Amino acid sequence: MTPANQCPVPAAHKRLMDCHAMWHSLANSYMQPDTFRMHLNSLIQGLRNVTFVLQKQKRELPHFETWYTEFQEQARHSPLMRWSVNSRNRIVKESDLELHSEAKIRWVADWLTKGERNFTFPPRMASREMLGAIFSDPGNPRVGIVTLSRRWVDKALPDYEILHATREVYIALGRLLTTAHEACRVESCTFETREPPCVTSRLTRDPLRCMEINPGALQEHIDLNAGAGIQEIIRPIPRDEKATQKARKRYGITELGKGDAMELTPKIMQAARTVLVRDKKHANFAWFLRGDDILDVMSPMYADQNAKYLTFHRLADRVETLRADGFIYLAETWYVTDHKYDENGKLMPARDRGRDRMEALQVFGATRDGRHITLTAPFSRNRFGKVVFGETLTDSDMDDMNYFGSFGPIIERWKAMDARGED
């Protein structure tokens, strides 16, 4: 048995940390083709070296043949792991990978009208030129939101973007080394932190939050209605324990406790009602979960409906990066009790209904395995501005626009992750 906190596979562990650092170097050079190619070659070889050096220690590792054989069997059935091995052989023995620079175009007119296409462009082609080429076709849309995402893709793995593909291989190797540590009954070990500071010796079976596979820096958003770009701004807010305690005292709210998205949704609604009564307003919040663990919390803000469409696609990007299997969204919204249609027979959203609409708090919860619920709490304000709630309504059938509209991008992303076998 290896002593506690003494790494049982130091050489392989350090190589995995090398790969973490190299992945970030790869991401940071995305717009520099030659530098990107250089870092990719190093990373592919580094990933393969993790298993090479691990096998050198097999006589020292308990039950090696059992758990390593299981890893090999899974790798043989994984297109990504086969690609990684074959790519290393190509790089070492033949030539560089055959990379293509793509522009992925996503167009969203409304919640139900959208589409995606991939175009191949030279790596250094300016975004303005790409968009000019795309919209020179009169058949392409002229309204809604267009998102242009730059992507490097290997000809041998056309369905995966390179950052995504290499991250998936890294995750598989991280799980392998976690298994090696568990076999030796070592819960953790410590090596010096690298640059960037996220490169630590911590092992996990889950994706690392720092490995963002849909970075905003590689996306551009254009509002076709306004003829202008939409700037995406993300402001990280570190947890402030003093502010948290102050807020709990103000609202009389304790910890939400543990639970998946379905279990936390009613608790969040109860807390939100308390906040709204106290403050007369409530910010939007999104929670990302894996099982009972909250991975991240965001407070999305958007100026208009087109920006809202974009926001929910970016939330879906975050779900994919974190590989979240639970999602909760809280917002103030407009609410109506019936349906009305305009002169063209199109359903009128509550926001356009005028005097017969009501204010409401709404919390939507969904899980990757298909469970979902919407809680809606209509409210009014009396002459003194006091918030008065009606009965909270529960809709678990999800036959409304919430499931197929606003939250459709998250549901669709889960389906895509399932199709790729990403657990």
Image: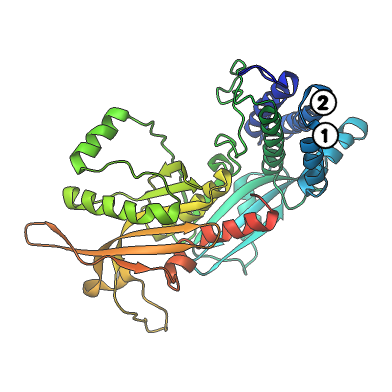
Give whichever of discs 2 and 1 has the lower sequence position: 2
Camera-side residue: 99 or 241? 241
Q: Secondary structure at mark 2?
A: helix
Residue 296 appears left or right of 178: left
Residue 214 percent location from the top left of the image: 58, 44
Residue 44 percent location from the top left of the image: 78, 33
Vertically, is 124 above or below 285?
Answer: above
Residue 58's label in the rendered image is: 2
Q: Which residue is mark 1?
A: 65
Task: Bin the neighbour count of mark 2 within 10 Å (Cα to Cα): few under 14, some 14-19, many 20 and up.
Answer: some
- Residue 110 seen in render: no
Q: Secondary structure at mark 1?
A: helix
Question: Which amino acid, by three-letter code, is at mark 2?
Answer: Lys
Task: Bin the neighbour count of mark 1 within 10 Å (Cα to Cα): few under 14, some 14-19, many 20 and up.
Answer: few
Question: Which amino acid, by three-letter code, is at mark 1?
Answer: Glu
Please name the residue shown 55% across and 43% down the image: 322
* Residue at the outermost right position: 93
Residue 274 percent location from the top left of the image: 22, 51
Please name the residue shown 77% across and 25% down the image: 61
